[in-house]
Amino acid sequence: MTAVPRPAPAAEEDVVPRYSTAARLSHWAVAVAYIALFFSGLALFHPFFFWTSSLFGGAAFMRLLHPYLGSAFFVFFLVYALRLREDNRLLPSDRQWLRGMTGYMTRKAELPVEGKYNAGQKMMYWSMLTIIPLLFLTGMAIWRPYFAPSLPLVFRRVAGLCHATLAFIMFVGIGVHVYAAYWTKGTMRAMTRGTVTGAWARFHHPVWYARVTGRRADAPPAEGR
């Protein structure tokens, strides 16, 4: 009997680890908390969005739940953000990226990146690191019946205005963040599988790729990968 030759095993995909399981879980905890916080906050922001209160079993429960969602979001974000502080340090090379940011966002240019994150991602990180604690503090100032009654009315009104303004700025920032993640093909894989392809890493983050793999970005993939 003639032996049937076995097919050669498929070459393993060239992948680079980008996020640990803990980092991904922290990220998705922040995302889920934000979505719940966003929809509960809409009903409090304007009567036109009052229908969103039905997602939480009614207005009374939504009003009770919103501050707790905000507190959970604040804690989840800090846990996640503190892990990323070192990778988000602004570098001199980030200035070049910021100068060409419009071309990047309109898909007309691909800009060089020195670290794990581009300058746009770093700006998003530092802006959220400022906005979210301020949202938490202004939210505490208008939280009834626990903190608001002990504060002057004028202070509560100013805190409420600041809270709504900061929430809108954060909404815009997160919208840009989601758009950029969708537009940059292969990015969503990093937050679902924890890895990116070697080609993605070499193209978008060549210096980071060289650091984590020990290979030059312009070098061919290792044999068998």
Image (spheres, grey):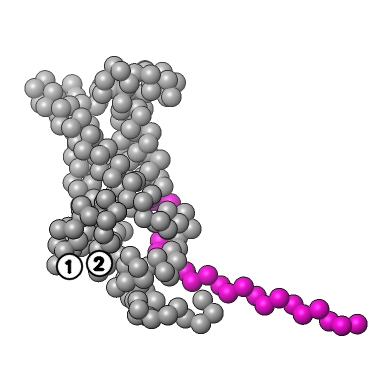
Instruction: Judge from the rendering whether residue 55 lies leftward or rightward of residue 96; answer left or right.
Output: right
Could you give the CA–CA distance between mark 1 and mark 2, rounded to whole angstroms? 9 Å
Image spot of residue 132 (x, y percent): 23, 42
Residue placed under numbered mark 1 in the picture = 93
Q: Crowding at label 1, few (<14), some or many (≥20) Cα neighbours within 10 Å? A: some
Helix, strand or loop at mark 2: loop
- Residue closer to the observer: 38 or 26: 38
- Considering only vertical position in the picture, is 54 above or below 17? above
Q: Does the rendering let one see residue 57? A: yes
Say whether residue 83 is left or right of residue 14. Answer: left
Mark 2 surroundings within 10 Å by alpha-carbon count, few (fewer than 14), some (14 through 19), many (20 or more): some
- Residue 176 lies, with reference to residue 60, above or below; the image says below
Q: Secondary structure at mark 1?
A: loop
Which disc is residue 112 wearing?
Answer: 2
Residue in the picture at 28% in, 22% down: 44
Q: Nearer the viewer, residue 109 or 3?
A: 109
Residue closer to the observer: 100 or 76: 100
Characterize the magenta stretch by its predominant secondary structure.
loop
Q: Where does the image place residue 160, in percent across and percent down from the top left?
A: 17, 26
The stretch of residues the image draws in magenta is 1-27
Q: Are marks 1 and 2 in contact (CB under 8 Å)?
A: yes
Label at residue 126: none
Of the residues tagged 1 and 2, which is closer to the observer? 2
Q: Residue at x 8, y 22 (%)?
A: 154
Residue 49 is a magenta residue: no
